[in-house]
Amino acid sequence: MGAEPLEFEGRETDPVSAERVLGLKCRLCGKQYPKEALNFCTDDFGPLEVAYDYEAIARTFSREAVATRPQTMWRYWDLLPIDGEPTVGRHVGRTPLIRADRLAKALGVGELYIKNDAVNHPSLSFKDRVVAVALSKAVEFGFQTVGCASTGNLAGSVAANAAAAGLDAYVLIPDGLEQGKVLGAMIHGARVVAIEGNYDHVNRLCSQIAFRFGWGFVNVNLRPFYAEGSKSMGFEIAEDLGWRVPDHVVAPMAGGSLIGKIHKAFKELEILGALENPVKTRLHGAQATGCNPISATVKSGASKVKPVKNPNTIAKSLAIGDPADGYFASQLIRDTGGWSDDVDDDSIIDAMRLLAETEGIWAETAGGVTLAVTRKLIEDGRIDRDESIVVCIAGNGLKTQEPLLERMARPTVIKPSLEAFEALLERDAAPALATV
Ligand SMILES: Cc1ncc(COP(=O)(O)O)c(C=O)c1O
Ligand SMILES: [Zn+2]
């Protein structure tokens, strides 16, 4: 397989590594399944989720044990669904949680943090977390060929992590994605296939391919395992807040999985007695107005998610018209007392610039969505200005340059002389005069 196991302290002597993970369970009817590459219930097509034995987990998991482990997402291995050592994505996670006081001041709030997965290793998005689990599981199951349906970030992550693990990767994307996303997948030697259609067409085709060829598609037949990787973002947030959970989390939503897994992570830490405060966090979801199936559901109070047929937004990574976990995301948002909103393209750009100018963080368009929605929630009084807020930035601005190039000024060009520079400073000092 080409993937060497990663040694963890205390891991070889762990007597319960396999027993922690009971199997899969249907989220609709509760039917149980063994650990296998399957994502839906054969009775009712409900999505399958990993089921754990928390008593077994409590035998190895403690805050003190975590503190001795590697500074990666795998420091929470007890709560991730792999049976042996993780073999793929061994350096993923443990991204900074940044106290963002300058941004907080601009938004008029007191306690604001950025969870910065724009700098996640190796492919600069939170998708490395889900891929690390999915591909470690793929190796366990014996798949040599893996794949994904992607809106961009997953493409780069599967390609990079598969390359490092010696796996063959097929990456399917909707045609017309940003250059940075496409190149970021192709550079690793993955077979990148662009489909004439939107993400929902890509996803449907990937389901057919996965089952026809018996390959491990991370977000199709490996999806129950894959999705669990996002919990590591929640574990890290809590640990970095001193084993406390915040009052509010704002998360970007495409398929609607990440938001639910952050909440699940908090609840698991609570079950294990690892938290200083009870989980009363309100989960808020962020979408673009050009593709807002989940926020439209929350805002209308509907119980069913109505798919968006033709997504149209610069936040291409969030452009999933028919979100697999949309129903559960909207329920969670309601149950936790959160809200979901959506923002237009100009607000997305404004928020990307605000984050970059106040905190020095260049997020991708989806990050602009998340921050712009946060601002809206604060202005609308849905987030109290005195309460703690974590904004999840899930991808890097280097990969979504096109909409910025269209909207931002070019650098000023001058001759290589001090006189030319002084003339520039004069012009800068008198901008009103310079334009007359
Ligand atoms: C940057 C970014 N943020 C958020 C998401 C949404 O994740 P989920 O599909 O789990 O809702 C994605 C998914 O592609 C993404 O690329
Ligand atoms: Zn079922």
Image (cartoon, grey):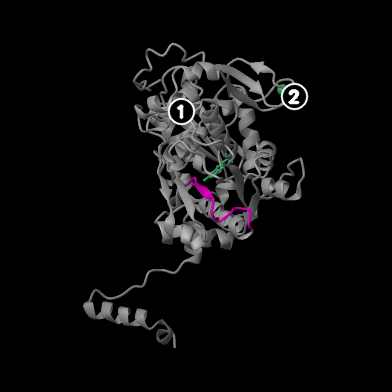
Within the displayed image, which quadrant is ligand 1 positioned in? top right
Q: Which residues are magenta?
A: 381-395
Q: Which residue is mark 1?
A: 168
Q: Secondary structure at mark 1?
A: strand
Q: From the viewer's side, name the closer residue of 199 and 342.
A: 342
Ligand 2 has an atom within 8 Å of the beta carbon of the residue at disc 2: yes
Q: Is residue 418 above or below residue 74?
A: below
Q: Position of residue 303 (x, y in %)?
A: 76, 40
Q: From the viewer's side, name the closer residue of 96 and 64.
A: 64
Q: Is residue 297 above or below residue 271?
A: below
Q: Secondary structure at mark 2?
A: loop
Question: In the image, is 323 to the left or to the right of 130?
Answer: right
Q: Residue at x 76, y 40 (%)?
A: 304
Q: Position of residue 258 (x, y in %)?
A: 56, 38
Which mark lies nearer to you, 1 or 2? 2
Q: Which residue is mark 2?
A: 44
Q: From the viewer's side, name the closer residue of 407 and 387.
A: 387
Q: Residue at x 65, y 52 (%)?
A: 341
